[in-house]
Image: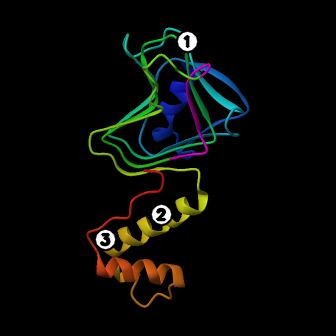
Amino acid sequence: TAIQNAINAVPSSGAGDKVYFPRGIYITDRLTGVDRVKLYGDGMGISVLLLKPGATASASITEIIKFTTKTQVTLEGLTFHGNRLLNSTSLVQCAVFSACTNVVVQGCELRASNGDISNGHPGEALGFSGACEGVLVSGNHEAVRRWRLAASLRRTAARRPDLLEGREASPEERAILDDLAKRPEAPEDPPGR
């Protein structure tokens, strides 16, 4: 589909790592994600990726987009809609991440069906499997900002401590670096997990 082609073009486009969905409803087949991509739209209920009827992974699982062993993935300002009937017995995973790192999902609506699934087999909006690290799922933008700052400082301290030496740090950065010096092996849990 055109949407999958746009996603596939991200690594080789040279134009950046973003795929933008303006206001509208985009009917799509199942999608496969790529590394270092930001899929974003104009907001929940405004930019909607609607799964085409019959576009399922199997009879028991419905996925809209799946990322496998990918890194630096952001989903923002979109509605992912599984387009399932209320009486469906298939599991709906709007966005699936398997063995991925540095994942951010914020400001997204993840809907399995045209209403609440009430048949005892609820949809699971997000699916995580394998060793997913650095996953951030939150609508709390301040918590997201703090987590990103801490992750950045932690990575810099581990890989290039020389960049931090002699640098004037803000009080917030100083508190993070002091905590890191006390507990270098303890990563901060992302908000929303």
Residue 33 % position (x, y): 44, 33
Q: Secondary structure at mark 2?
A: helix
Q: Amino acid at mark 3?
A: Arg
Question: What is the crowding at mark 3: few (fewer than 14 residues within 10 Å), some, or many (at least 20)?
Answer: few
Q: Secondary structure at mark 3?
A: helix
Please tell me whether residue 115 is drawn above or below residue 87 in the rendered image: below
Magenta range is: 105-115
Question: Residue placed farthest to the bottom in the image?
Answer: 166
Which residue is depicted at the point 55% across and 12% down? 85
Q: Nearer the viewer, mark 2 or mark 1?
A: 1
Q: Amino acid at mark 2?
A: Trp
C-alpha distance separating marks 1 and 3: 49 Å
Which numbered tag is attached to residue 159?
A: 3
Which residue is depicted at the point 56% across and 25% down? 3
Residue hosting label 2? 147
C-alpha distance separating marks 3 and 2: 18 Å
Residue 89 % position (x, y): 43, 13
C-alpha distance separating marks 2 and 1: 37 Å
Q: Nearer the viewer, mark 3 or mark 2?
A: 2
Which residue is depicted at the point 45% across and 24% down? 122
Residue 113 % position (x, y): 57, 20
Residue 91 lies left or right of residue 75; in this view the side is left
Please tell me whether residue 95 is drawn above or below residue 87 in the rendered image: below
Residue hosting label 1? 85
Q: Nearer the viewer, mark 1 or mark 3?
A: 1
Residue 115 lies left or right of residue 158; in this view the side is right
Q: Amino acid at mark 1?
A: Leu
Residue 13 % position (x, y): 52, 39
**Quarter of the image where one finds residue 23:** top right
Q: In the rendered structure, does residue 188 fall within the stretch colored magenta?
A: no
Q: Main structural element of the magenta stretch: helix, strand or loop?
A: strand
